[in-house]
Image (cartoon, grey):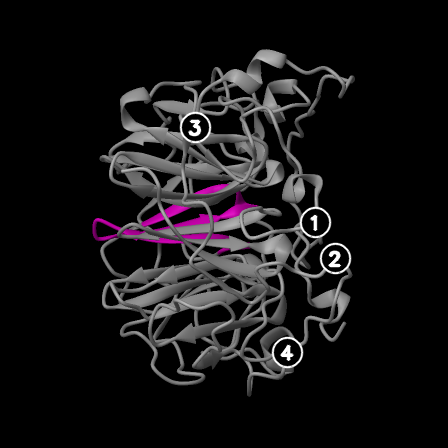
């Protein structure tokens, strides 16, 4: 395989920055995986997505059973973690995470394996390596993950450079430099938390998610266990965030704020979306979705609801059950919304879930499902060879109209679907 092992992002890898003293939580699960609830197969669900995606990028619709090379070119992806359609007809930009680059298409592709038109982060379509194997710059990336439309341009979570890159207008060429950087004071720096053992309003450590919603910029600053909010479009490099969620101040960075899990704390925030006026954050490490009424304007505000758990102090994946349910989650990394629906990538169960706004309440059951036969099943590609309608660790979601972009990371592809729900 051309992509070297060290180029594949692993969340367990330690940063050079000192780790904060954190209060660890213990996960547990029912010990007997043979325990199944037969009635769960009879729980009705709506199909969330159409039968198959209308376009698959980076990989084959029916991938070969034998693992093949993932050499970088105009048609391949390696562990992509994000993608976003920037306008009604495009362009489409994706984070080709394992190849440390962004790939862009002028128009939203309608055919499988459509070659990309642009690349950012590498000298050409056939090169790879962190920051293009040269010094960090305004167009280099190191494990890019989250991506979104941002004003008239776009924003990218350049996770292992510990920064957010913002283009004021959408790039329309190779290696267009970003205009603004957050998390660092300039485009030449890339230390976690500026090399310090504490966080700040202008620093980051592994920011995995980014969203531009209602004239606010949101960043899931994962290893600092928090979400940062800017009120309005940032205008200068290294600009301080205005609000922090998950911590009581900008300096703290402990897991679950150094205490037991609560309605305020976070363990591994990643996805961000707005659902009928409610701010939603996927707290993957606590196996839950946190939901606030509106956008909080003060630090450390408690969320109002959680999905995936029955209350705010519980965190076990699948609520300590081996087999999932309609109301459980296992490392949910991504969120998106469309009309009345909150769509969640239940990543470790390799499935996509949909909640309807009428059901909003702590511990509510999902109504819609794709990727598994029923709410009781799990398994990468349903524990079968991958096919067009299966998933293996979906990491990124984004909607545009009735289309959803899914970064199907474990299958080394990004798939474009029509939604079946209205």
Decide: few, some or many residues near mark 3? Use Cα within 10 Å; few <14, some 14-19, many ≥20. many
Residue at x-position 40% and y-position 38%: 48
Point out which mark residue 128 bears.
Answer: 4
Q: Check contact, mark 1 vs mark 4: CB within 8 A.
A: no
Residues at marks 1 and 2, CA–CA distance in whole angstroms:
6 Å
Q: Which mark is residue 264?
A: 3
Q: Which quadrant would residue 97 be assigned to in this image? A: bottom right
Q: Nearer the viewer, mark 2 or mark 4?
A: 2
Mark 1–mark 2 CB contact (< 8 Å) = yes
Viewer-proximal residue, 369 or 186?
Answer: 369
* Mark found first going from the N terminus, 3 or 2: 2
Q: Which residues are magenta?
A: 204-229
Q: Secondary structure at mark 3?
A: loop
* Residue 374 at x, y percent in the picture: 54, 27
Give the residue pinned by disc 1. 385
Residue 65 image label: 2
Viewer can see residue 54? yes
Residue with the most extreme bottom position: 123
* Residue at disc 4, secondary structure: loop
Q: Quadrant of residue 278?
A: top left
Q: Quadrant of the N terminus?
A: bottom right
Give the structural element (helix, strand or loop) at label 2: loop
């Amino acid at each position: 395989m051309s992509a070297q092992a060290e180029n594949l992002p692993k969340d367990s890898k330690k940063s050079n920055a000192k780790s904060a003293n954190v209060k660890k939580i213990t996960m547990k699960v029912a010990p007997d995986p043979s325990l199944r609830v037969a009635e769960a197969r009879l729980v009705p669900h709506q199909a969330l997505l159409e039968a198959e995606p209308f376009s698959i990028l980076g990989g084959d619709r029916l991938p070969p059973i034998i693992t093949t090379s993932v050499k970088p070119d105009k048609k391949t992806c390696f562990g992509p973690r994000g993608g976003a359609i920037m306008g009604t007809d495009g362009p489409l930009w994706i984070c080709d995470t394992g190849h440390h680059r962004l790939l862009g298409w002028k128009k939203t592709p309608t055919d499988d394996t459509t070659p990309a038109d642009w690349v950012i982060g590498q000298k050409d379509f056939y090169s790879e390596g962190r920051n293009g194997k040269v010094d960090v710059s305004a167009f280099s990336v190191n494990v890019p993950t989250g991506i979104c439309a941002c004003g008239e341009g776009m924003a990218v979570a350049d996770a292992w450079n510990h920064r957010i890159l913002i283009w004021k207008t959408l790039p329309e060429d190779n290696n267009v430099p970003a205009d603004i950087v957050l998390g660092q004071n300039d485009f030449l720096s890339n230390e976690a938390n500026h090399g310090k053992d504490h966080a700040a309003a202008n620093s980051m450590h592994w920011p995995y998610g980014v969203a531009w919603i209602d004239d606010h910029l949101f960043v899931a600053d994962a290893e600092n266990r928090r979400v940062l909010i800017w009120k309005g479009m940032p205008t200068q490099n290294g600009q301080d965030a205005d609000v922090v969620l998950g911590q009581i101040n900008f300096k703290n960075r402990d897991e679950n704020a150094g205490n037991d899990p609560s309605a305020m704390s976070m363990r591994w925030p990643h996805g961000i979306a707005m659902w009928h006026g409610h701010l939603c954050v996927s707290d993957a490490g606590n196996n839950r979705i946190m939901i606030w009424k509106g956008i909080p304007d003060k630090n450390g505000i408690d969320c109002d609801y959680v999905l995936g758990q029955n209350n705010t102090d519980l965190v076990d994946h699948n609520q300590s059950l081996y087999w999932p349910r309609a109301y459980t989650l296992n490392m949910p990394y991504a969120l998106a919304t469309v009309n009345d629906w909150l769509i969640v990538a239940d990543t470790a169960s390799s499935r996509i879930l949909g909640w309807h706004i009428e059901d909003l309440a702590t511990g509510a059951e999902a109504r819609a499902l794709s990727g598994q036969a029923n709410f009781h099943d799990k398994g990468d590609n349903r524990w079968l060879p991958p096919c067009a309608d299966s998933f293996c660790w979906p990491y990124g979601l984004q909607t545009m109209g009735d289309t959803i972009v899914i970064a199907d990371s474990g299958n080394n592809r990004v798939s474009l679907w029509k939604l079946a729900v209205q």
